[in-house]
Amino acid sequence: MIDRPLTIAGLLVLLLAWAGPLPGMVAQSFAAHMSLHMSVVGIGVPLLAAGLGPLVGARGWLRSQLTLPIAASIIDLVVVWGWHAPALHHASRVSSLALAAEQASFALVSLLVWLVALTSSSKTRRSAALAGAMALFFTSMHMTLLGALIGLAPRPIYGEHLHHGLAGPAALADQQLGGVIMLAIGGVIYLAGGLVLMARVLQRQEAA
């Protein structure tokens, strides 16, 4: 029931993200921190969810009714925006334990969103696809908004002391690059996923 190639690919991306050089770079670079974030929630977790989706759907562990996608999206918003609040963001940049907690929470809530979006049974495929598209569209919207706020800010949001050696224009450029990464990976991938699910809804509607 598990799609093994997708599951393995997702796990490999997560392993490369967390065991690679990015975690050691987050203290010096906001862009590196955002690259780590997007590698997890925009690439690794979607692949993992696509691999696990058939098993979850067959077991009936998640039923994509309207309330579940909304709840998953709101939880994701709270977690993502919460960790980008100055105090928590600072902690994740200077403490390995805080960074681990941040990354674990990002991965778990993102996995919930993607599983809700991709999981369905044979009887609920159309309604599940519609509910999943809503969840992904909402997530794309709040990620796009956050990425735009970060990327278009006229000064470093978190204070130049968080950039550890970067100051003035360099700190701002680092922050702007991080915002672009969030827009280009997070916002686009969630939007693309939502559009694919909406296309499935329309195709099934025409077939009916």
Image (cartoon, rainbow, N blue to C red):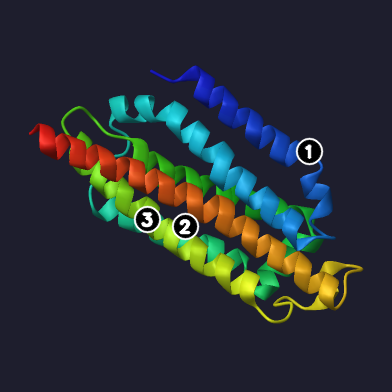
Disc 3 is placed on an element classified as helix
Query: Residue at the right extreme?
Result: 165
Q: Residue at x 46, y 27 (%)?
A: 51
Q: Which residue is mark 3?
A: 137
Answer with left or right where residue 78 lies relative to residue 67. right
Location of residue 90 (image quadrant): bottom right
List x then y, in percent, for residue 64: 27, 43
Q: Residue at x 24, y 41 (%)?
A: 128
Location of residue 160 (image quadrant): bottom right
The amino acid beneath tag 3 is Phe
Q: Earlier in the sequence, mark 2 or mark 3?
A: 2
Q: Residues within 10 Å of mark 2 (few under 14, many from 20)?
A: many
In the picture shown, does residue 41 fall above or below 138? Answer: above
Q: Is residue 64 visible?
A: no
Q: Which residue is mark 1?
A: 20
Residues at circles 2 and 3 in contact by the CB criterion of under 8 Å: no
In the picture shown, does residue 122 fall above or below 164? Answer: above
The amino acid beneath tag 1 is Gly
Q: Residues within 10 Å of mark 1 (few under 14, many from 20)?
A: few
Answer with left or right where residue 27 lies relative to residue 153. right
Q: CA distance from mark 1 to mark 2?
A: 25 Å
Q: Residue at x 23, y 30 (%)?
A: 121
Disc 2 is placed on an element classified as helix
Q: CA distance from mark 2 to mark 3?
A: 12 Å
